[in-house]
Amino acid sequence: MPFSTSKYIKFRQGMQKRIGSLRSKTEDSLDVAIDVMMEERVDSFFRVEQGLEEIIRSLIEIEEDLESIRDLSGAMRLESRLEFVEDRWDEFDSEIRERPRRRRKKVSLADMLKAASGGGGALSENPSGVNNAMDAYAIMGVEFGSSLSDVTAAFRIKAKQLHPDANNGDRSSEPELRSMLDAYQFLKEYLSLSNTEPMRPPDRPYSPAE
């Protein structure tokens, strides 16, 4: 779906704002790392330093690729890359400052079955650490850009295959179920939004169930 000129300008401005903000936060994280890690966590510092430098390089590449985006599909892919880089920064910054990362919400099998049967309810609160469409599609095992109906069909099939009742009560697949449910909920809301509004307000990252 091609962008109108006005939507493209808004998307580019929003992405540039996020890129600039993340670059500034990354540089600040590097300064803090030097102050707090060099004496007692020097081995970790060199790994974190390399990771933060990779983030800055990725931001430069994303900013360059931004100039070639002209349609919704390309915009979603580029935004997914930026969301991945934002998540990587949060991982390194959490380690530097020794603070906890965002917590995943535990998803019960009851919630999973409700989603598999087409229900909603508690699932409207996106729980998880699935932060971009690219990761969510990969977890679901469907091609990037697949429709919501394809995603839902894949979810129902896999949920039934992994459910303990289909595996003699074996609950070892629960972590995979939870991960898949996180991805399904993310894509359900992400794709529903894209079907009604070609692009959400560009000055903030996507958060399901906003």
Image: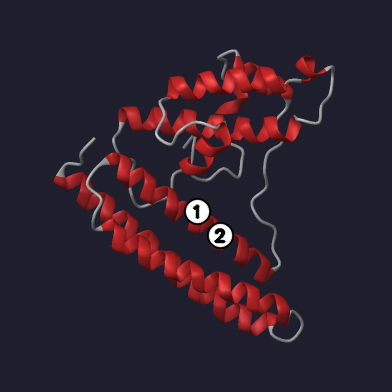
Q: Is residue 173 left or right of residue 182?
A: right
Q: Which mark is residue 31?
A: none
Amino acid on which the number 2 mark rests in the picture: Arg
- Looking at the image, which residue sits at the far bottom? 39
**Residue 173: where, in percent of width, then height?**
76, 30
Q: Is residue 207 left or right of residue 200?
A: right
The answer to which image quadrant residue 30 occupies is bottom right
**Residue 210: where, in percent of width, then height?**
46, 37
Mark 2: secondary structure: helix
Name the residue beneath numbered marker 2.
Answer: 88
Mark 1: secondary structure: helix
Q: Is residue 208 left or right of residue 93?
A: left
Identity of the residue drawn at 73% across and 35% down: 175
**Tally of numbered discs:** 2
Amino acid on which the number 1 mark rests in the picture: Phe
- Looking at the image, which residue sits at the far top? 117
Q: Is residue 115 visible?
A: no
Q: Is residue 149 left or right of residue 139?
A: left
- 178 lies above or below 164: below
Identity of the residue drawn at 50% across and 69% down: 54
Of the pair 172 and 106, the residue shown nearer to us: 172
How crowded is the residue under tag 1: few (<14 C-alpha within 10 Å), some, or many (20+)? some
The quadrant of the rendering that contains the N terminus is top left
- 76 lies above or below 16: above
Name the residue beneath numbered marker 1.
Answer: 84
Q: CA distance from mark 1 to mark 2?
A: 6 Å
Tell whether label 2 touches label 1 (CB within 8 Å). Answer: yes
Identity of the residue drawn at 65% across and 36% down: 179
Of the pair 117 and 124, the residue shown nearer to us: 117
**Residue 201: where, in percent of width, then height?**
33, 45
